[in-house]
Image (spheres, rainbow, N blue to C red):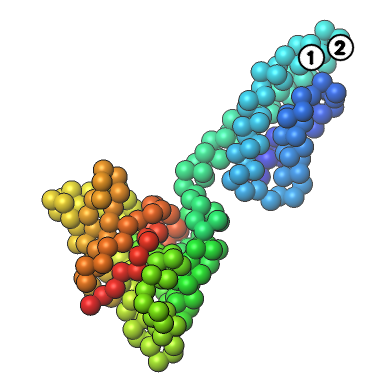
Amino acid sequence: MVKLIELIRDGTLCFLTDLKANLRCDLSIGLSLTLKLWISREFNNYQISLLTNTLINSFPFLLRSTLRTSLVCSANIKKMKKSILTLFTAAILFAGVSQSNAQNTVMVGGEAMYPSKNIIENAVKSEDHTTLVAAVKAAGLVETLQGSGPFTVFAPTNTAFDKLPDGTVPTLLKPENKGKLTAVLTYHVVAGKMDSKAIMKAIKMGKGKAELKTVNGGLLIAKMNGDKNISITDESGNVANISVYDVYQSNGVIHVIDTVVLPK
C-alpha cells in the first residue's frame, strides 16, 4: 500500500507543477490529501475511499487540462500525459486495495473493525461493547480470545446487558462470581469460524434450525427470522437477533446481538 501511495505521490507532484492554477477545487483538495497521507503515513478506509474516488472521478478533467495545456506548451505534453497515466494507474490499483479492505471492514460501535486484528483488539475499540469487554477481562478470558481460535462470538451490546434484571451485571463482575460469569460469556462463543453464510447453510441443512454447540457445552439454536435475518435462541427460550453480521477477525468472526443469551 505504501508503494501505491508513493506512486500516487510522484504523479501528484508532477501535476501540481504542470497544471498549477488550472486545477479544479475538488481535485486540488484530493491531491493535497494525497500528499498529506503520504507524508504522515496514516491511512484509514474513509480517507482511502475519498482519495481514490476523487482521483478517478477527476480523470476526464485531468485529460482535458492536459490537452488545453498542450496548446500553450506543447513541449510538456509527453511529460503531463505520463503524469496523468501514472496517477490514474495508481488510483485504479489503490481502488482495488481500498475496495478489498472496505468489503472486509465493518463499523461497530463507531469504530472500524479490522480483519487483520484479533477479537480482543477490535472489541476494545467498540463503544457499544464496553460492558462485554469489562466482563471478558473480569472472567480472565482476554488471553483465550486473543488466541488463534478460530472462534465465532455472538457479542451482546451494552444495551443488551442493560435489558438484564437490575444488579445482574455488577453481581456477575464480582470476583466470587467468576465461574458464573465465565459460563455466561463462553455460552456466547462457538468453536470455529461461522459467518452468516455458514449459519444459514446449517439452518437449511437442519430443516429450519441449526444447533450450535458453545464453548461452555450448552446449545444455541439458530433460525431464520425473515429472508436474511438470523435469530439466536438460548436454552431458556430467550431470543437474540443479530444486528451486525460477519465482523471478520484474524482469529474468527463476530456477530453483534441485541440480547444476552443465558445457559440453563
Using a 10 Å C-alpha cutoff, classify the residue at mark 2 as few (fewer than 14 neighbours), some (14 to 19) or many (20 or more).
Answer: few
Mark 1 touching mark 2, by CB under 8 A?
A: yes
| Picture coordinates of residue 233, whole percent (x, y) | 24, 63
Q: Is residue 195 left or right of residue 137?
A: left
Q: Position of residue 183 (x, y in %)?
A: 32, 79
Please name the amino acid that badge 1 sits on: Ile
Identify the residue at image location x=47%, y=72%. Answer: 131
View extreme (top): residue: 71
Q: Residue at 41% across / 85% down in the picture? A: 171
Q: Residue at x 42, y 74 (%)?
A: 144
Query: What's the mark number on residue 188?
Result: none
Q: Residue at x 62, y 48 (%)?
A: 44
Q: Quadrant of the C terminus?
A: bottom left
Camera-nearest residue between 251 and 140: 140
The residue at the far front in this view is: 166
Query: Which residue is labeled 1 in the image?
Result: 77
Distance from disc 1 to disc 2, alpha carbons, whole Å, reads: 7 Å
